[in-house]
Amino acid sequence: MINAKDHKQSYLFDPWDYLGPKRRKLMEESWAGLFRKEILNNLPVSELARHFEDGIGRPTKELYTALGVQILQQMNDLTDEETVEQLAFNTKWHFALDIPDESDEAKYMSLKTLWSLRKVIVESGIDTLLFNQVTDTLARVFSVDTSRQRFDSVHIRSNMKRLGRIGLFVRCIHKFLVNLQRQQANLFASLPQELVDKYLTKKSLSCFSMVKPSETERTLVAVSTDLFDLTRRFPDHPGVMSMSSFHQLLRVLEEQCAVTQTPEGSPVEVAVKPAKEVSSASLQNPSDPEATYDGHKGQGYQVQVMETYCATENREKTLNLITHIELETSCQSDVHALIPAIESTERWGLVPDEILADSLYGSDENLGRARERGVEVVSPTMGAPQKDKVGLAEFTFSAGGKVIACPGGYAPVTAKHKKRRIHRRFQPRLLQHLPAEGNLSR
């Protein structure tokens, strides 16, 4: 049963009158007053209500409270236990969420309910809608200048142990055997006892972490063979095929190994691929299957973030607002993130006139597509400047793009054009101000 209160309806008697005029003023001028007045009534409750049946079952938690608590938890960086406690006893939270009722039903939320609601919100995409609506509200209330914005990515390390290739094979096999023992006891009993003893016990797992460097290659061949044999042992068994741990075995086999097949298509041999041939999008840890690898920053994820900024002296008093955020795997290139970010801000009326971004965002294609949308991208060129070289930027160009003077202000003595190549020659005695090598870099 859907439980959603109309918070736009006024009270006959003010339930917050007990605060007194001074404390009430402090409350109204705090973040709680802003949240209650501008954000609470604009939460996408109708989207959340679609996941519940009206008139059937027990009443849900009040849906405005359910969504508001999720925002306040992230805003204050709280654990689930801390969130439940704040909802139960924090007066500012009660005022922000418009909960004057002192009952447990109104001010208490179990950990399971909090987790279940968050799961629904994330899986249905309501979290993205929440972010966009709150951002739009804050931009309107504070008259945020969105004409200038900056864009970059932030790496998030996966909170899992970093595994080598041997550790990855072993952990995937161990996880599959544990699940097979729980879900398919008959099939598990058919496995060789040697294989079970090798991978299932914690003591045996610790042995793989003590492999000598000289034995690494031989051990890797052995564990890859065991994994390959496990994938062939249960052909098309519906119970095994439905297990996520079995699909991880297949994924590791495909990403880390090369399987030789007969002309009839039957696999006959497995060999471990060289490390350089393994994709950065490969599985890093079976406990975090969506994490990937970045050659510079390591395992984990990356978040694309665009925010407003102020270049004036009053920037300390100006609200800088995050206008776009997108979670990606860490193996994705930044070059593909710019245009979707601009399109996202367009939908909410927060599109900038100018974006400061790193060099990867400033490809020719991105610059052209952004300019078509009226957005100027300011980005450094790729590569580091070379010492003792003169760049083209130091020469003087005409309106048509032709070189008309050297850095010293002298005109070229000859000019030649050949297809797409342009040659300008200057008198050597006039170029003494240049480096001794006289090199010109593009």
Image (spheres, grey):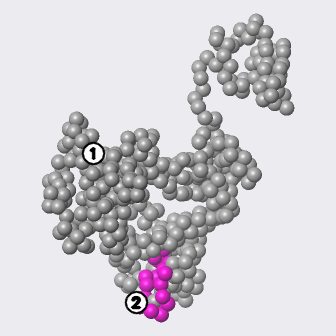
Residue ID at (47%, 77%)? 65
Which residue lies at the image location 25% right of the left edge and 68% below the top edge?
180
Residue 20 can be seen in this image: no
Residue wearing tag 1: 220
Would residue 64 be counted in the magenta stretch?
yes
Query: Residue 365 versus residue 122: which sits nearer the camera?
Result: 365
Percent of width and height locating residue 208: 21, 47
Q: Is residue 281 above or below residue 432?
A: below
Residue 102 in magenta stretch: no
Instruction: Tell me where the magenta segment starts and ends, as one range.
Output: 51-69
Type of the residue with mark 1: Leu
Residue at image position (27%, 45%) is 220
Mark 1 neighbour density, 10 Å: few (under 14) some (14–19) many (20 or more): some
Give the residue at the far front of this rendering. 263
Tell me the mark number nearer the camera, choosing from 1 and 2.
Answer: 1
Q: Position of residue 410 (x, y in %)?
A: 81, 15
* Marks 1 and 2, how far apart at CA: 54 Å
Q: Residue at x 45, y 51 (%)?
A: 281
Name the residue carrying label 2. 58
Q: Secondary structure at mark 1?
A: helix
Res. 112 visible in picture: yes
Examine the residues drawn in magenta and state their main secondary structure: loop
